[in-house]
Image: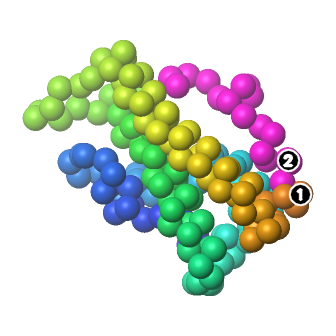
Amino acid sequence: MKVRFISSNYVMEGFPSTEIEDQVVNYAIEKAQNLHIHKTLGTSLYGDIIEKVSNSAITAATDVTLMENYIQPCLRDYSIYELITLNSFKLSNAGLMKSTNENFTSVDLSELKHLKSEIRDSAEFFEERLKYYLCNNSASFPAYNYGTQDIKQSGRGDSYFFGIS
């Protein structure tokens, strides 16, 4: 089982929607966690938190605060950001298909970009809060400063980020 820092229910509480399959939401969580949270925390702290979550060992007050007040809100918004594209299109034997529903009208590209931009802005706000908290509480999270440069230095300018932002 993959370790996720939030549940699909937590994500859906922050996003008005009709039914979205848990499988799709969980994939968005995993993608957001690996792309955004891992980069922000760095490899050492991310590994420590994965281990604590998998062992149900998030019990210290500093760990609970970090998880509930900083990591989870950031991860929720990045998961919604990833989910918008994942849920808008489906890959089938016939190729990439746009999802449709009789009761809803599809958004156009400019509306999609606007919505994704607003959600990304919110996620980035929470990400900055997370970084600020970690920097101001570095004594409580020594793994944050240890051997994390491999992940934290990569960013949006890298060639693997492309497409609709």
Q: Would you say residue 145 is visible in this rendering?
A: yes
Magenta region: which residues?
Answer: 148-165
Residue 83 image point, x, y percent:
42, 43
Residue 46 image point, x, y percent:
71, 62
Q: How is the image coloured?
A: rainbow
In percent of the image, x 42 and y 65: which residue is there? Answer: 7
| Circle 1 residue | 147
In percent of the image, x 55 and y 58: which residue is there? Answer: 70
Per the model, the C-alpha gap separating discs 1 and 2 is 7 Å
Q: Does the magenta stretch mainly form a helix, a strand or a loop? A: loop
Q: Residue furthest left?
A: 103
Is-magenta flag for residue 152?
yes
Camera-side residue: 57 or 99?
Answer: 57
Q: Quadrant of the N terminus?
A: bottom right
Which label belongs to residue 150? 2
Q: Are marks 1 and 2 in contact (CB under 8 Å)?
A: yes
Q: Would you say residue 34 is visible in this rendering?
A: no
